Amino acid sequence: MHRRTLLASGAVLTLSGLAGCLGFGAETAVGTLPTASLRMEPVSDATIATRRTYGRGVDEESPEYDLVRAAVDDGPTRVDDTEPPFPADRPFVFEDGVYELSVDVVDSRPATTFFVVLDPAEGDVADEESVAYADLPEVDRAVFERRGWDDPGFLGFGTSVRYLDAHVPDSALVPDPAYSVVVWDAETRGEFSVDGSRETPLRTYEYTASVVADSAATLGRELRERYEFTLSGLSAAEREIVAEAVDGDDGYVVPADHPLPDAMRRLGSRFRSRDDVEYAGSETGDDPPSVDGTYLVRYDEEVYWTRIHVTRPSTATEASPS
């Protein structure tokens, strides 16, 4: 394989820029946060790597698959787009290996995106106002074919189309349509209009793949060894909370405005000095910190991807000891 090797070991050092881009642990609350919550899911080393890297990995159903496959297997790969189609410098899992893609812009051509509407044409249309699809200039038909409009299943939508500026003079539709209606057949007639435009240069991006770790399991093991800690010596009340966190559909939750059970407060304090697997090293300031993060926890010989939230003690009402 023509792959530039980035790191063969110590791969966890490459992950510091990923906080906030991750899957399971990067949940965003809508509305009021609960007083406390704890959710624990058993994970393998390979799953840890997938969740700690960009997204959920790259599979054959994703639009980026062909790009990543070519960069990993064949070496530097070029693709034309107005924006980078895949993020650079973010480790991701691909077919069990862990990679990063670097990207360079190697070419740029002026292009314009036109915002267009294609609605069903109503009533009679003068011959000079309509054009058969087959009679459109080649540049227009090429744009339509890329969008699947050479045989439209329906009409009645607004969208955007991109033309290289060098091709615009050959178009019958942009920037000012020479025809108001495109005719595919007697039953399919589309009223075409342009509603604005913006410059969107078409760039050629060259992607190069680098190996971060030979396997997801290798990276996951390094992460686990760095971040894992053990929950042990729990009280009966604490073990009940952990059992619900593991087995409950939504984990363990103390709703907003409900008092914080003492057992949950004690559990939360066990996390306060530990490194969050997503936000290790973040500053909490001088106030007593709330606990809110994602951790790797070993409990009863199983490793769990653990999401915990405990409201700051100064704002939570504590229950009687339990």
Image (tube, helix red, strand yellow):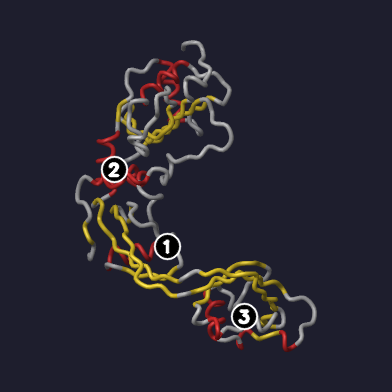
Q: Residue furthest left?
A: 8
Q: Which residue is mark 3?
A: 173
In the picture, residue 287 is in which quadrant?
top left
Left-right relation of 173 to 264: right
Q: Which label was assigned to residue 85?
A: 1
Mark 3 neighbour density, 10 Å: few (under 14) some (14–19) many (20 or more)? many
Instruction: Please say whether residue 304 is visible from this viewpoint.
Output: no
> Distance from label 2 to label 1 (Cα)?
26 Å
Relative depth, front residue between 79 and 74: 79
Query: Disc 2 or disc 3, which is closer to the eye?
Result: 3
Q: Which residue is mark 2?
A: 220
Marks 2/3 in contact by CB < 8 Å: the verdict is no
> Distance from label 2 to label 3 (Cα)?
53 Å
* Badge 3 or badge 1: first in the primary sequence: 1
In the image, what residue occupies the spot 34% across and 31% down?
Answer: 297
* Badge 2 or badge 3: first in the primary sequence: 3
